[in-house]
């Protein structure tokens, strides 16, 4: 069976082979992971160079960003290996990002909200379109 646009209903008329959609999803997820690492580093530097009133909340946020970045990095690895373990975290992270984008737009940060929402939507579509290969394990 050949890969065609009809094999991937979520992509509509875009013709993308199975291997390419996995690579695209992996790169998009790794870009998101890099962004989380950069945001964590920014918060760390900002915390060390200024007075912070609630240090425990900032530390918790930095740890959350680092763990989220590590999780998304390994999710990208799952896409490259055409495995299923990267899809769940990627879908969840991007649904959250779409919600954050909505509140950014609602809070008068329109350009940032639209940028975040568009990137999250593209990553979500790529993650859903990257169908993993069947498991080749033994049956009993």
Image: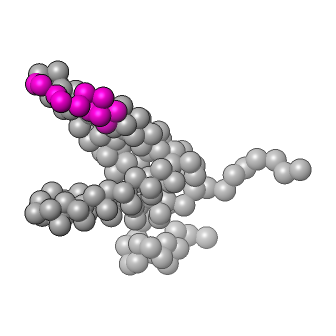
Q: Which residues are magenta?
A: 50-62
Give coordinates of residue 3: x percent, y percent.
52, 68
For this rendering, which residue is in front, 87 or 42? 42
Q: Which of the two residues, 103 or 140, is positioned nearer the viewer here?
A: 103
- Where residue 96 sits, quadrant-wise, is bottom left
Q: Is residue 129 among the parts visible in the rendering? A: yes
- Tell me, what colour scheme is on the image? one colour
Q: Is 117 situated above or below 61?
A: below
Q: Position of residue 107 (x, y in %)?
A: 15, 62
At a point 41% along the width and 48% down the height, the residue shown is: 26
> x, y (%) of residue 111?
11, 61
Position of residue 108 relative to residue 86, above or below, is below
Q: Is residue 95 above or below residue 62?
A: below
Q: Main secondary structure of the magenta part?
A: helix
Q: Residue at x 66, y 56 (%)?
A: 134
Q: State the residue lying farthest toward the right.
A: 140
Residue 93 sits inside the magenta stretch: no
How many callouts does the rendering have? 0
**Measuring 57% from the left and 56% from the top, which residue is drawn there?**
132
Q: Image height check: is 64 above or below 91?
A: above
Camera-side residue of 110 and 26: 110
Instruction: Check residue 59 for magenta coloring.
Output: yes
What is the x, y in percent for residue 81?
Answer: 54, 45
Instruction: For residue 41, say whether it is visible.
Output: no
Q: From this viewpoint, which residue is outermost toward the top? A: 48
Locate the N terminus and report the quarter of the image it occupies.
Answer: bottom right
* Residue at 72% from the left image edge and 49% from the top image edge: 136
Task: Say whether residue 61 is left or right of residue 105.
Answer: right
| Drawn side of residue 31 relative to residue 124, left or right | left
Q: Residue furthest front?
A: 53
């Amino acid at each position: 069976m050949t890969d065609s646009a009809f094999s991937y209903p979520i992509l509509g008329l875009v013709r993308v082979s199975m291997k390419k959609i996995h690579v695209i999803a992996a790169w998009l997820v790794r870009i998101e992971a890099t962004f989380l690492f950069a945001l964590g580093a920014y918060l760390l530097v900002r915390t060390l160079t200024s007075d912070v009133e609630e240090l425990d909340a900032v530390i918790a946020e930095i740890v959350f960003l680092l763990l989220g970045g590590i999780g998304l990095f390994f999710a990208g690895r799952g896409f490259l290996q055409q495995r299923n373990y990267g899809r769940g975290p990627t879908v969840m992270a991007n649904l959250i990002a779409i919600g954050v984008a909505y509140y950014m737009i609602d809070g008068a940060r329109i350009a940032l909200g639209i940028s975040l929402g568009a990137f999250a939507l593209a990553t979500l579509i790529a993650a859903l379109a990257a169908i993993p290969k069947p498991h080749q394990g033994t049956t009993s």
